[in-house]
Amino acid sequence: MIRHGQVNGFENFTIYGHTDIDLTEIGYLQMEKLAQQLRFVDVCAVYCSDLKRSVAGAKIICRYHDAPLYPLKDLREMYFGEWEGMTLQQIRERFPDELEKRGRDLLHYAPPGGAESVEHLSRRVMSCFNKILKKHIKAQVIIVAHGAVNRVILCHALGLELTNMFNIHQDYGCLNIIDYFSDHALVRLING
């Protein structure tokens, strides 16, 4: 499981969510380096969010594998409603009360404008992820997704409450490795 590479505007801590944004030159290099690292892994499929920052990375990974690529809307980053495209500083200035509400109830709070809550994100992502796991029993797949998506999957694999998801760091272009067995998951690498 991979987080897409660095994106344009990263230095401003912009909240993109479902906003389609391109990778930076460094982002492409991060994905190329990761693709080379994984070139000898026997992969049966590559899945990704349908947003271009994930698709771009997944296509780079696929160059080294004879595996189909499946862009899926359900692997998209969390939708932030009116906060989409705003920097963290802008959100602090314009929505201080909303940020306070979010801090009190991370799981159920949804920003204004029809945004998702963490709980909704988790249901969407885990439903999709479980279908991928069932389809590829005893096979290796690569998923190129987003920071919050990866954190949700990692929390489930580690048996952590979703309220702890932001205690797991996800750098741009990072690698996470999880082995799934019939009765448990084994997390081999986080943010590598």
Image (cartoon, grey):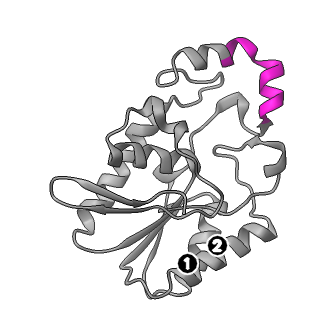
User: Horizontal and vertical percent for residue 102?
Assistant: 59, 20
Q: Check disc 1 and give the amino acid type.
A: Ile
Q: Determine if the magenta segment contains residue 33.
A: no
- The span shown in magenta is 87-99
Task: Report the residue marked by disc 2.
Answer: 31
Say which residue appears at 83% left-offset and 49% top-offset. Answer: 11
| Position of residue 161 in the picture relative to residue 107 (left or right) | left
Q: Determine if the magenta segment contains residue 97.
A: yes
User: Horizontal and vertical percent for residue 144?
Assistant: 53, 63
Q: Check disc 2 and give the amino acid type.
A: Met
Along the line of sight, which residue is nearer the eye, 118 or 68? 118
Say which residue appears at 40% left-offset and 43% top-offset. Answer: 155
User: Horizontal and vertical percent for residue 136?
Assistant: 27, 69
Position above or below: 41 against 80 = below
- Among the 4 quarters of the image, the one containing residue 182: bottom left
Say which residue appears at 56% left-offset and 71% top-offset. Answer: 58
The quadrant the C terminus occupies is bottom right
Along the line of sight, which residue is nearer the eye, 53 or 140? 140
The secondary structure that most of the magenta stretch takes on is helix
Say which residue appears at 65% left-offset and 25% top-offset. Answer: 113
Q: Are marks 1 and 2 in contact (CB under 8 Å)?
A: yes
How crowded pointer 1 is (Cα within 10 Å; few <14, some 14-19, many 20+) is rated as many
- Among the 4 quarters of the image, the one containing residue 152: top left
User: Horizontal and vertical percent for residue 56?
Assistant: 65, 70
Q: Which mark is residue 61?
A: 1
